[in-house]
Image (cartoon, helix red, strand yellow):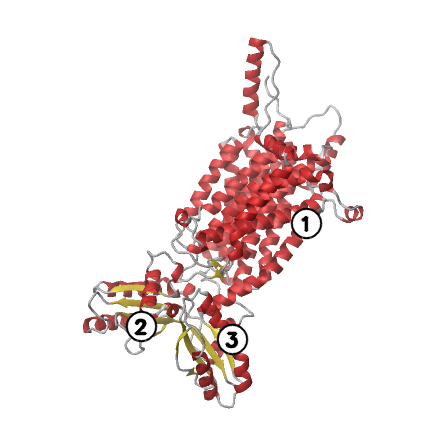
Amino acid sequence: MATFLYKLGRLAFKRRHFVVLIWVALLTLAGVGAASAPAAGTTSFSIPGTEAQKAFDLLEQRFPGASADGATGRIVFKAPEGEKMTDADNKATVAKTVKALGDGSEVVSVTDPYTTNAVSKDGTVAYTSVRYDVPGMELADSTRDALEAAGESARDTGLTVDVGGDALEAGAEMGATGEVIGLALAAVVLVVTLGSLVAAGLPLLTAIIGVGIGVSTITALANALDLGDTTSTLALMIGLAVGIDYALFIVSRYRAELAEGRGREEAAGRATGTAGSAVVFAGLTVVIALAGLAVVNVPMLTKMGLAAAGTVVVAVLIALTMIPAMLGYAGGKIRPANEKRKDKAKVEDKNKAKVTGSPRKPARPNMGTRWASFVIRRPAAVLLLGVVGLGVIAVPATQLELGLPDDGSQPTSTTQRRAYDLLSEGFGPGFNGPLMIVVDAKKSDDPTAAFTSVADGIKGLKDVVTVTPPTPNKAGDTATITVIPDSKPSSTQTEDLVHAIRGQSADIKADTDAEVLVTGTTAMNIDFSQKLNDALVPYLALVVGLAFLLLIVVFRSILVPLKAALGFLLSVLAALGAVVAVFQWGWLAGLIGVEETGPIMSMMPIFMVGVVFGLAMDYEVFLVTRMREAYVHGESPSQAVVTGFRHSARVVVAAAIIMMAVFGGFIGASDSMIKMIGFGLAIAVFFDAFVVRMAIVPAVLALLGKKAWWLPRWLDRALPNVDVEGEGLRALDDNRPKGTADEDRELIPA
């Protein structure tokens, strides 16, 4: 592979105009496609195989036109001090609001609080509900504006009015602020690492082009493939981060090749052949992790994963072709690694020798060399400290509680949160999370008796406040019952109530031949969390297993891939522990603006496993590949570790900081879900890069010695030789005729 990529890099360097033209044309084509494609709403949210989804599907069949999955909006009214919502003026305001809400084109029904008993017992709080014919994330902006305008108009009369419900939900927007912050910090890190504005600009430029192609393609295909607005969110985050990192590694290796005296075309080919090989396998691990989200069998996650994986593939291809081409345009503006430092040291040593007559001192080892030498001298202590430290941070993960965010997790400054609190105040906390019971009595001899039996049975359960009378369909074979719990939607008591109702279904079916299904937003969230929890272990086994086999091929070792996988698990557990401590327990929550603690988002563990695993293997491949290269070329195991750190530690640290900058830029988002994702991914990258890869990895390799690179002979013969170390490139040197020079070697005046 190294030889093939070497030839590809040199070809891209020579044919730079053609290569850049192709990528610019692809970006233009994708942009035109995105601009001309019909707008697509958020992809329909479904959870195949769950009881809640089965009930929704049944409602669509038995209650046609009812829009079971349609959005619901609520306008909550509170009378001023000393007044009641039953006063004449307040009733007139509510009636005017109800009339205004009924004019929308997507509105199915609007309730009058005075005819539906939607006034609190003390008369101070009332609400009206609006039902729409499409899900909340697919509502037209004009419909949301009309809902908010109706609330604002009522507020002008002196009432306390707030708007809630999933009708106000919009696609999760990462916002331009996070991207700008991440790019700005990445630019600073690149300039410091590469020592040149031109060299730093190449990774940023190529990453933006790659993300532009990926996100534009997703937008262009959104309507045809039922891709929602949120599908591009993960592609944007991952594509930007890996695009910068992959380009950084190749540019850094290019400067190192220049420092060894190679011509620019040859250096571009060597950088693509060596660092490019690591880019290919690092990209494959990310693609495996993202595409593996299909195991969860949630269409939304599958599409997000595949879209992000496609963007990563684009980032890899751009790094292998466009970066060598851009290096050709840069010419002498990108200087060899440490050239300025070496020139300065030579001048200082020469001046000192003239004055004192003493010989020159050897060059001081860089920070990576000094750190690796320190770890090799004390591997057991470093390993113990790293493992114990991450283990302690991971302890809160044992108390992990999963759930999905609702209006109760919104900041107190939002109208959704205030409406949630008003409903809890007037009607109880469970009113914000009603359960819908669907009774299918099509096979029952007496459907009406079955409906009544189900309602009576639920009334006797613990934590039930209200059970509405059954509402049958026109055929009379299916009915819905609304149950108001006594606890808030995200509580364990409400979850226990859902399981208790489902626990009665077997007895009811035996007695009446009627099937009882529990659905509604609260039940859907519970089922979604359970499905993700059940899929976590199979997903982890699949992703880690495939990547383990891939890394065996790359490193030709059993223990190195095993160590990589175990280190990843340790960093993910520590990151989950940090997320629980901040977002569930509230530790240091004020520092990052967490206003409301609660259950951790259900998608967080599996999302973190998928994303962080791919990124962690990036660092493993880039760092350890250089060690493997040194070991294969004759260095001792300990010296190979030092060599790997000397050449790669600075770049890996820079790549990790860039990742953290991209993800950390979203911690300032107002949306609690985005804030949690940004914090979780940033802290996970920190633990994996700076503790696992920078400390635990060299300590383990120092303790293992030659055993780290052991591979059974039969397996060595069976595995394909992908030549990540660039052994084939060394053969090119051996076969080069003596006395010849590279055709593009530059003459430097002395």
How many other residues sit within 10 Å of disc 2, few (<14), some (14-19) or many (≥20)? some
Residue found 60% across the figure and 18% down from its top = 361
Q: Is residue 707 visible?
A: yes
For label 3, the SS is helix
Which of discs 1 and 3 lies nearer the camera? The answer is 3
Q: CA distance from mark 1 to mark 2?
A: 59 Å
Residue found 34% across the figure and 67% down from its top = 424
Do the numbered discs 1 and 2 sit on residues whose CB atoms are within 8 Å?
no
Residue at numbered disc 2: 102
Residue at numbered disc 1: 550
Picture coordinates of residue 215, whole percent (x, y)? 50, 52
Q: CA distance from mark 1 to mark 3?
A: 44 Å
For label 1, the SS is helix
Query: Which one is in front, 100 or 547?
Result: 547
When the figure is inspected, residue 256 is found, relative to residue 68, above or below; the finding is: above
Among numbered discs 1 and 3, the one appearing first in the sequence: 3
Do the numbered discs 1 and 3 sit on residues whose CB atoms are within 8 Å?
no
Q: CA distance from mark 3 to mark 2?
A: 36 Å
Quarter the N terminus occupies? top right
Among numbered discs 3 and 2, the one appearing first in the sequence: 2
Residue at numbered disc 3: 502
Query: Which one is in front, 404 or 487?
Result: 487
As shown in the figure, which amino acid type bears the numbered disc 3?
Arg
When the figure is inspected, residue 629 is found, relative to residue 574, above or below; the finding is: above
Picture coordinates of residue 709, whole percent (x, y)? 72, 41
Picture coordinates of residue 446, whole percent (x, y)? 49, 90
Among numbered discs 1 and 2, the one appearing first in the sequence: 2
As shown in the figure, which amino acid type bears the numbered disc 1?
Leu
Which of discs 1 and 2 lies nearer the camera? The answer is 1
As shown in the figure, which amino acid type bears the numbered disc 2?
Gly
For label 2, the SS is loop
Tell me if 119 is positioned left or right of 680 in this view. Answer: left
